[in-house]
Amino acid sequence: MSTTDSQKNNRSNQRESEKRGELNAGSTLSNSPVLVGRISRRQFLLRNAAAVGAAAFGEVALGEGEPQVTRYRLAIAGLREPVRMVQLSDLHRSWCVSEAYLRRVVTQTNALQPHAALLTGDFVTDSSTYMDSCCRVLKELNAPLGSFAVLGNHDHACDRHRGGPVITEALEGLGVRVLTNDSFRLGNRLNIIGIDDFTMGRPDPDQAFSGVRREEPGLVLTHNPMLFPWLEGTNYITVAGHTHGGQINVPVVTRSLMRRKHRYLKGWFHARSGPGKMYVSRGVGVVGIPIRLRCDPEITLFELFPA
C-alpha cells in the first residue's frame, strides 16, 4: 500500500451552511505556483489583476471573507464515545492571507467547541518567515484533546525546498502533534493517522499504519487527496485539502480543466473499490492571487459518534 519516495506535492455575520453527508464528484487543482520572497513586481501586478478580474465578474472574495462551516455527523464503528473534530486546511499565511483574517478563522473555530483539531497542511505559501505569525494565531486554537497536523506541498517547498523541518519545529513548539507517516491513539480508541504530502513529501502509508490496531477506528490526515487510491482498502475516513475547491470557479470551465489531471476537487468521495471514503476541504486561505470566486473558504466540523 506504500507509495514510492519519488512521489514528492466569524465575526458576528458569520455564515454556517450545514450539510449532511452529501457526495460530490470532482477533480483537484493542479500544483499552485510557489511565490518567492517579498512582494515582487509580479505579485503587485497579480493583486491588481485580481481586483480587476473580480470586479468584472461582479463578485469579490479577497481571501478575507468569513468561512462557511460545514457539518457532518458520522457513525464510527468501535468508537467509545462521541467526539467533535474540526478540520482547518490551507491557511497559506502569506502576503495575500493576513494574520488578522486567520485570527478570525480561529475565533470562529473555537466557537464550535471542538475536542480536537485536524490541520491538513500548507500553513504558509512561499516562506517560513510567515510561520511565526501563523503560530501566534494557532496558539489561540482551543482543542482539549489536541491538535494534529500534516505538512503540505508548500510547507515542504518553501525556503527553496528546505521548509519542512522549520514548519514542523514551529508546530511542535506549539504542542501540535505533527504526524509525518505516524499515528496517535486517542482515549476513545480513535486512531489519528497522518501521511506525508503526495508530491513534495515522502508518503509512507505502511509506516503510518504500523502502530494501528486494524480493529480500532481511525481517521487519516493527508494534504493532497491524490493519495486516496492507496487508502481505498481501509475502513477509515480520510480528510485532505490542497485543492482550495478550485479557488476560482467558473461554471463548467473550471471543472473541465481540472478533470484533465486530477480526480478530486471538493466534498465527499467514495473508494472505487473498498470501504474507504474521503473528504476534501476547500480550505481557508488562497494562493497565487488574493481571490476566491464561487468557492467560499471552509471550516469543517466532523461530529463522530459510536455506530
Image (cartoon, grey):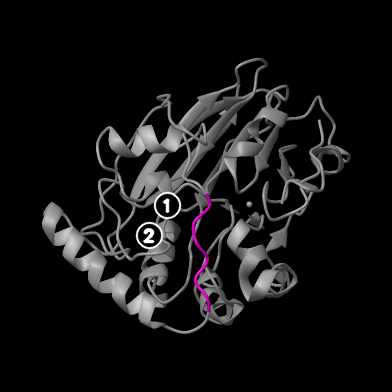
Q: Quadrant of the N terminus?
A: top right
Image position of 52 (left or right of 90): left
- Up-down: is 53 above or below 237? below
Does dot 1 land on a helix, a strand or a loop? Answer: loop
Q: Main secondary structure of the magenta part?
A: loop
**Amino acid type at image mark 1:** Leu
Q: Find out whether residue 300 is within the magenta segment.
A: no
Residue marked by disc 2? 108
- Dot 2 falls on a residue whose secondary structure is helix
Q: Residue at x 62, y 57 (%)?
A: 153
Mark 1 neighbour density, 10 Å: few (under 14) some (14–19) many (20 or more): some
Tag 2: amino acid = Gln
* Residue 147 coordinates in the image, percent (x, y): 63, 58
Q: Which mark is residue 112?
A: 1
Q: Is 213 situated left or right of 115 in this image? A: right
Q: Is residue 114 above or below residue 286?
A: above
Q: Is residue 266 visible?
A: no
Q: Nearer the viewer, residue 111 or 120?
A: 120
